[in-house]
Each structure stands twice: as C-alpha cells, then as structure tokens.
Image: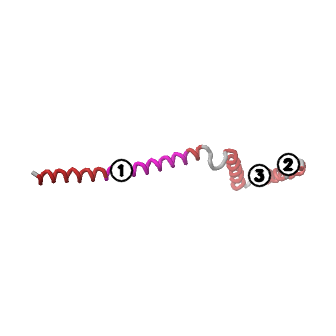
Amino acid sequence: MDGDLFLIFAFILLAGIIILTFANVTHRRANAHEEKMAELRARKAEAESGGGIAAADHRKLEERIRVLERIATDSNHALASQIEELRDLQEIEDRTAPQEYTQ
C-alpha cells in the first residue's frame, strides 16, 4: 500500500510541476505580447496625432512636390516664363518689404 501511495503522490507532484511550468511560460508570453501591443498602440496614436511633421509643413511639402512634378513633366515654355515671373515677384517683395521683416 505504501508503494501505491508513493506512486500516486509522485504522479500528482509531477503533473503539478508540469502544469505550473506551462502556466508560467504562457503567462510570460502573454505579458510580452501585451507590452508589444501597448507599444504599437502608442506609436499609432503618435503617428495619427502628427508626431513627426506638422500638418502645415506636410501641405507645403506636398505643394512643392506637385510643382516639381509639373516642372519635370511639362515641356511647355509658358511654365518657364511663369517660374521667371515668380522669381521676379520674389525679388520685388524682398526689395519692398520693411527691413524688420527681412531679417
């Protein structure tokens, strides 16, 4: 009877060790997954709030890219004259602007 009792006790102890080890590993993996998900949510929120470039800067860059694309693809001489007119307007604005604004 003592041998059977010892085998039952050893079986229960071994099963408990295996179950607790499996539960510990599973718990650690679940925690690591939750931390990774929290980090990804934080990155997503930062990206949605415009954490990098401000919206106004983004629009300015898009506008410049459109102009450059138009310049690169348009072989019309009217575009060249429009660019020269814009340069002339910029020079006029620079000359007529008050000194405190130009600095």
Label ID, residue 26: 1
Name the residue that disc number 2 marks.
101
Q: In the displayed structure, does residue 85 sit left or right of residue 20?
A: right
Q: Which residue is mark 3?
A: 79
Rendered residue at 35%/51% (across/down): 24
Alpha carbons under labels 1 and 3: distance apart: 66 Å
Mark 1 element type = helix
Mark sitting earlier along the chain (3/2): 3
- The tag earlier along the polypeptide, 1 or 3, is 1
Q: CA distance from mark 3 to mark 2?
A: 30 Å
**SS class of the residue under badge 3?**
helix
| Amino acid type for the residue under numbered disc 2 | Tyr
Q: Is residue 47 left or right of residue 6?
A: right
Give amino acid for label 3: Leu
Assign a secondary structure to mark 2. Answer: helix
How far across and down, in percent of the image, does residue 88 sit?
A: 85, 52
Answer left or right for 78 relative to 39.
right
As measured in the structure, the alpha-carbon distance from the residue carrying label 2 to the one carrying label 1 is 65 Å
Question: Is the magenta region chiefly helix, strand or loop?
Answer: helix
Q: Residue at x 56, y 44 (%)?
A: 45
User: Which contiguous range is marked in magenta?
Assistant: 21-44
Q: Amino acid at mark 1?
A: Thr
Whole-percent x, y for residue 21 in the image: 31, 53
Where is residue 35 shown, x and y percent of the image?
47, 49
